Image: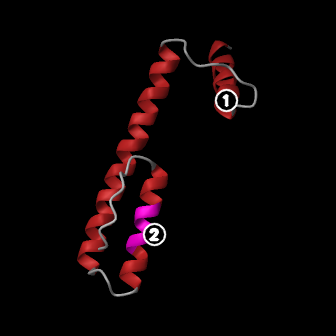
Amino acid sequence: MKQNTFKVTTANDLRRLLAEVINELKNGEMEVRVAATIGNLCNTQLKIIQAVDFESRITKLENGEYIENESNPISSDIKSRISELRN
């Protein structure tokens, strides 16, 4: 694998890394075993990114920090679910 060093901290970073791995694999520059290992690590990292994001959102909701925004689909979804629970 080429010695590109960039931090993999976002889902977009994972996308870039996997695109690079796929291209190197297609060009015969990487062994399948190595590509598979990187793919597994990317799956694990994506789960961690999603969990951290989810935890952050929950914490904001619990602390009342979530700013209501009509253009935010999550905000309207939360409002409708709260309304359903109250009925």
Tag 2: amino acid: Ala
Residue for badge 1: 77
14 vs 61, left or right, is left
Residue for badge 2: 19
Looking at the rendered structure, the secondary structure element under dot 1 is helix
Residue 18 counted in the magenta span: yes
- Dot 1 or dot 2: first in sequence order is 2
2 vs 50, left or right, is left
Q: Which residue is drawn at 41% across and 84% down?
A: 26
Locate the C terminus and report the quarter of the image it occupies.
top right
Q: Quadrant of residue 68?
A: top right
Magenta stretch: give its range: 16-21
Tag 1: amino acid: Asp
In this view of the protein, which residue sits in the foreground, 2 or 26?
2
Q: Which residue lies furthest to the bottom in this view?
A: 28
Q: Residues within 10 Å of mark 1 (few under 14, many from 20)?
A: few
- Picture layout, residue 82 above or below residue 29: above
The nearer-to-camera label among 1 and 2 is: 2
